Amino acid sequence: MTDPYALLTLGVLFSVGLAADQLGRRTRVPRVTLLLVCGLAAGTMGLLPDRVAELTDTVTITALTLVALLLGGSLKLETLKAHGVEIIAISLAIVIATLLIVTVGLILIGVDFALALVLASIATATAPAATLDVIKQSGVKNRFTDIVIGIVALDDAWGLFVFSFCLAIASQMAGEDGTVGIAVSWELSGALLLGIFIGLPAASLTGRIEEGEPLQVEALAIGFLTAGLAVWFGVSFLLAGMVVGALIVNLASHHTRAFHEIEHVQWPFMIVFFILAGAALELATLKDAGIIGGALIALRAIARVLGGWLGAVISGVPRAERALYGIALLPQAGVAIGMALLAGQALPMWEEQIIGLTIGATVFFELTGPIATLWAARRSV
């Protein structure tokens, strides 16, 4: 029998999303943060029915795959020709700085080298959904936001590669089985192959019928096929979605509205995603994180700001923008938790520490990061 409370809850969630959108337009608070806070309140008070909470994994994968398609669509050849040097230099500098500064900082306060290395590699992960939505909400479209979107598209790919490498090293040092590192390598290479498998025919076949509902159905079909096959084969749905989006935007010269349609259909999924993500947050993890958790948060923030500045200097970005890139890329979300779960399986002796510290840092950056991103985007004008 259909659960009326689940249907009523979904109706309320969409109403809350609409209210958050309107409030975000009239204030300087990102609607992402508003939705997360609403979800946090609902979760704390136990207002979400079990049937709605059970949708979390499905909604998360669907929403993030649609975001990945949009991120891939931002990687146009003309954009890469115009800003490719900046995108690659800044993204690599942020990842390398995060890995080095967080690892060294944690070692200096007494954390084991292998554990510090894994935590630092997890700290390289970002929050593509939050970052992209905040930039969209800001209404700012300039060179700075184009570069930030390009960086976000590459950041998690670099992060997954770094995490795979560091986890393999840590597993060997701890005398554990290194097969998890192999699994993460498959997650990357398999996602690339899947993205090509879906993206090439999609670039040729889609967008050849009239605008409107048919194209919306195409956008949903591509999103769900990419997400479903990625989960089936155990590969990164984020990377697969980015590859599909990049192939479509660069190879489908007949397309005029492919990514506009994805933008139209993604927001309802994003509302439910952010509220459910907020409901899953536990502020107690921040209190329990202790000195190591506080150090992890501080080191990650310092590393990203410093890495963004260094990459901007190397790539010749105007002086006024250099300090803004790392600030805009502070958000962190579910990708980091996924990495933590894998690391916990590979290193069971540190499982509780890895997962607890990662969740604590993620809660902090998920709530505060979007505010920093919105500030940076508006400051760039």
Image (cartoon, grey):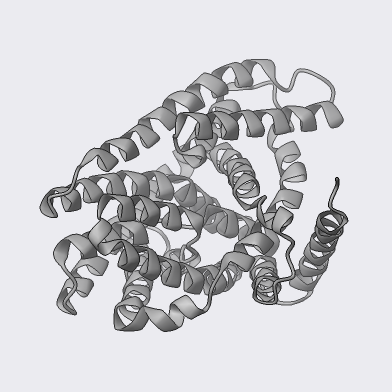
Task: Give left or right: position of 315 versus 132.
Answer: left
> Horizontal placement of 163 versus 172: left or right?
right
Q: Where, by quadrant of the figure, is residue 316 drawn?
A: bottom left
Q: Residue at x 17, y 60 (%)?
A: 114
Task: Locate residue 291 relative to residue 368 in the image: left or right.
Answer: left
Q: Position of residue 170 (x, y in %)?
A: 18, 53
In the picture, the quarter occupied by the N terminus is top right
In the foreground, 140 or 67? 67
Count of marks placed on residues: 0
Residue closest to the eye, 120 or 158? 120
Q: Where residue 272 appears, x then y in whole percent?
A: 71, 56
- x and y, in percent, of residue 238 in the image: 50, 41
Q: Is residue 360 above or below residue 163?
A: below
| On screen, residue 362 above or below 207 | below
Q: Residue at x 59, y 16 (%)?
A: 201
Q: Is residue 208 visible?
A: yes
Q: Position of residue 328 (x, y in %)?
A: 50, 65
Q: Residue at x 59, y 48 (%)?
A: 57
Residue under the point 53% across and 68% down: 366
- Which corner quadrant holds the C terminus? bottom right
The extreme front residue here reads 1
Q: Is residue 269 left or right of residue 364?
A: right
Please tell me which residue lies in front, 352 or 216: 352
Is residue 140 among the parts visible in the rendering? no
Task: State which quadrant residue 68 falls in.
Answer: top right
Quick check: 285 above or below 56? below
